[in-house]
Image (cartoon, grey):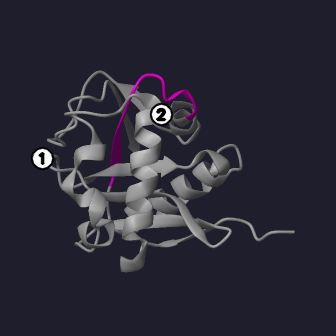
Amino acid sequence: MPDAPRIRPIEAGDDAAMAAVIRAVMPEFGAVGDGFAINDPEVDWMHRAYAIERAAYFVVVDAGEVKGGCGIAPLLGGSDDTCELRKMYFLPELRGRGVGAAMMARCLDAARGFGFRQCYLESLCGMDAAMKLYERSGFRRIDGPLGATGHGGCNTFYLRDL
């Protein structure tokens, strides 16, 4: 029986694999073009982007390969007590296996450990399974965006007290 997927902090050697995951998953949901995370410069150097104070990025390793990830970091343009759940993407073979819930728990634990009191995230209509995970994880929809993420293509916003 193969090993279960494992979640661990991102390493420099994971950058290319994680960029490939993001660039494979986002087009599935029409999240391409201006205003979407696929165009963020950090996509090509995720380990460096999250090597800042009060930030962490985790990857999912399955069958020896990076197949997904998610991170938390301070919300740009937001209050000091609010973080953002960022770039949560999984290849199709990970979906439906409980990896999203495990990753969510890992990120929210990290956020609490960094002293954040709220967690914000942005999504896109059509990412139905992701939105169900957010709601099961205690996030509530809010009317509009917070902070200055630069992701104007997103149209669904969530906030959760930690």
Question: x, y percentage for residue 71?
Answer: 39, 59
- SS at mark 2 in the image: helix
Is 145 a magenta residue? Answer: no
Is 122 a magenta residue? Answer: yes
**Could you classify mark 2 by the number of other residues whose Cα lies within 10 Å: few (under 14), some (14-19), or many (20 or more)?**
few
Checking the image for residue 28, the label placed there is 2
Residue position marked by numbered label 1 in the rendering: 77
Residue type beneath disc 1:
Gly
Task: Please state which of residues 160 and 125 is positioned toward the viewer in this rendering.
Answer: 125
- Is the Cβ of the residue at disc 2 closer than 8 Å to that at disc 1? no
- SS at mark 1 in the image: loop
Residue type beneath disc 2:
Glu
Please determine whether, in this image, residue 159 is positioned above or below residue 89. above
Task: Please state which of residues 159 and 73 is positioned toward the viewer in this rendering.
Answer: 73
- Among the 4 quarters of the image, the one containing residue 92: top right
N-term-proximal mark, 2 vs 1: 2
As drawn, is 90 to the left or to the right of 98? left
Q: Is residue 11 visible?
A: no
Please determine whether, in this image, residue 69 is positioned above or below residue 38. below
Q: Residue at x 68, y 68 (%)?
A: 63
Instruction: State how far apart marks 2 and 1 are (Cα).
Output: 29 Å
Over which residues does the magenta segment extend? 117-129
**Could you classify mark 1 by the number of other residues whose Cα lies within 10 Å: few (under 14), some (14-19), or many (20 or more)?**
few
Question: x, y percentage for residue 32?
Answer: 31, 34
Q: Residue at x 45, y 46 (%)?
A: 24
Question: x, y percentage for residue 151?
Answer: 22, 37
